[in-house]
Image (cartoon, rainbow, N blue to C red):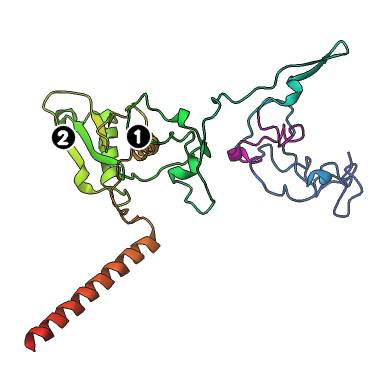
Amino acid sequence: SSVHFGNGTAGRVGSEFSSQAIRRKCSQNPTRRYDNRTLRHPLPGYRMWRGNHSKYLYQSYQTAKYGEGEAQREYHQYFAHAKCPQDSCRANEMEYLIVQRGIPRSLPLPKPQIPDGSVPRWHWKSWHMPYKSIDMWRRELEYPEHIPSHLSEKYTRPLSVLAPKIIYKQLNGRCMKEIRITICPFLYGYGNTLQALAMGFYKISTSCRSLVDKKQIQLLYSLEQTLPIVEITWLDGTIYRPPLFEGSSPYDILQNVMETAFLMEDRILAQGIKLPEGELPDLGKWETVLEYKLSKKAKLEMSQEEAEKSDSAKQK
């Protein structure tokens, strides 16, 4: 084979020293990019017209790899050509209007399963609401038939049908009454066990990043040799015990707890129970810390001014 872009060579035959590599391919490992971005083919454009890359060549039904496409958005390159964005995974009308043997057979179109005469309440949403707020995840038309009155009589609205996909890194204790972590002090020193997991969760929940009042967190020592227990009491009095699995990280417990906390906050608000006013400052964000400190400073200055005024009034 001859060298296409040689340094003064016409070919390999008879040349004592070849200035080119035998194989012009940067690496067998596709994740190493040495000069993948340069032209690799002697003829203009085998993969040039694809944008000089060879991605998305698979013809099989498989999830996108993490670097490819919009894997996080549940959008798949393989189906992108064939799927109409209007058909979002629901049956279209072609299932109900069939032609069999030249005879059109039209099935009755499905109707919503709502009794006649029930008037929905329009729950208005806007994009200016925060993404995490429960109002974003409620249904827009709330029918009285959807109110879960079989659970208790206090519910005034239907529960939210969706929950946001969030990876939680902090504990937010707005709808929690208390957190109890029970461990046995005699079981220390046996490696990476469930007890280390529970203590890791205790460390997370008491750290400065968690938005919990530290008085709510209790660490209990049991004198019997028991497995560690994490108990979370919500504002309506129900108790949640997240599962502790060996080998998982304390952030998995945090994720479990916070996903349950979203649902619990939803049903607490639907029952009309008032949440405590105001949120704790998120001490992991510098702007919030600054704002918090400035507000404290302003309050301090105000109180000093008031003290000076009262002093001057006393002197008069």
Identified at 44% across, 46% down, the residue is: 133
Screen quadrant of the C terminus: bottom left
Answer few, some or many: residues within 10 Å of disc 1's Cα (few below 14, many 20 plus, some between 14 and 19): many
Please indicate whether residue 78 sits to the left or right of residue 299 in the image: right
Q: Is residue 20 highlighted in magenta? A: no
Could you tell me residue 31's position as x and y percent?
64, 41
Residue to which mark 2 is pinned: 220
Disc number at residue 70? none
Residue range of the region highlighted in magenta in the rendering? 67-89
Q: Secondary structure at mark 2?
A: strand
Q: Nearer the viewer, residue 10 or 269?
A: 269
- Marks 1 and 2, how far apart in space? 18 Å
Q: On the rendered structure, is 49 left or right of 63? A: right
Q: Residue at x 7, y 84 (%)?
A: 314
Q: Is residue 147 left or right of residue 292?
A: right
Asked if the magenta segment contains residue 72, the reply would be yes
Which quarter of the figure has residue 90? top right
Which quadrant does the N terminus fall into?
Answer: top right
The amino acid pointed to by label 1 is Ile
Q: From the viewer's side, name the closer residue of 131 and 167.
A: 131
Would you name the residue on which mark 1 appears? 253
* Relative depth, front residue between 87 and 142: 142
Residue at the far bottom: name it: 316
Quarter of the figure with residue 75: top right
Q: Earlier in the sequence, mark 1 or mark 2?
A: 2
Q: Position of residue 213 (x, y in %)?
A: 24, 49
The residue type indicated by label 2 comes to: Leu
